[in-house]
Amino acid sequence: MSAIFCDHRNMTSIGDIAAIRFPLPPPGSVTPPDLYFDACEQAERLRTEEAEHLEAASEGLEADPLLLALEDARARKAAADAEIRRLLAYGREFHGPRPYRLDSLAQASGMTISGIRTAYGIREIQEVEHAIHREPNRRTTKSPTKEAPDH
C-alpha cells in the first residue's frame, strides 16, 4: 500500500513541477487579449510534455523528479550564460568598426560595465567566429594566448 501512496505522491510532485516550469499566463497578460486561451492551451501542452518527460526520466534513472528538474534548470541557466557571453563577444568584437557601448550591453544583459569587460574571452570570440564564419572586426587586448575565463 505504501508503494501506491509513494507513486501517487510522485505523480502529484511531477504535476506540480511541470506547473512551476510552465505557469499559466495571468489574465490580462497576453496581447492581443483574444490569444489568452491559446496561451493557456500552450502552457497546458508544455506541462503535459514536461510531466511525461519527468516521469519517464525519474523512472528510468530511478531519480527524484525534483532533483532532475533542478539539474535541468541549472543546465539551461549555464547554456543561457554561455549564450550571453557569446552575444557580448559579438557586440564588442564583431559588430562593425564601432563596438556596442559597454553601458548599453551592461543594461541589456543585467551586468555591470566591469562585468562586461571580463565576461567573455578568447574561447567565446572563437565560438562566435566559427558560428558567423568571419573574423572579429577589432583586435582587443584579449590575445590568443590569453586564457579564456572558466565558466
Image (spheres, rainbow, N blue to C red):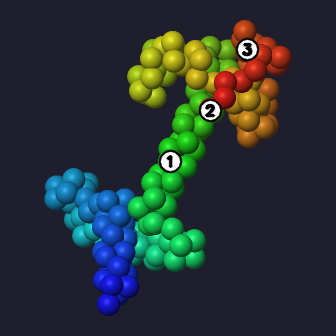
Quadrant of residue 32 in the image? Answer: bottom left
Secondary element at image label 2: loop
Q: In the picture, which quadrant includes the C terminus? A: top right
Quadrant of residue 116 in the image? Answer: top right
Task: Name the residue: 33% across, 70% down.
Answer: 13
Q: Is residue 51 above or below residue 121?
A: below
> Taking 22 as reference, is 134 left or right?
right
Tag in front: 2 or 3: 2
Secondary element at image label 1: helix
Judged from this view, the residue extending furthest toward the bottom is 1
Marks 1 and 3, Cα distance to the nearest angstrom? 29 Å
Residue denoted by label 2 = 151
Circle number at residue 142: 3
Residue denoted by label 1 = 74
Residue type marked 2 = His
Label total for image: 3
Residue 52 rendering spot, x and y as whole percentages: 46, 77
Q: Residues within 10 Å of mark 3 (few under 14, many from 20)?
A: some
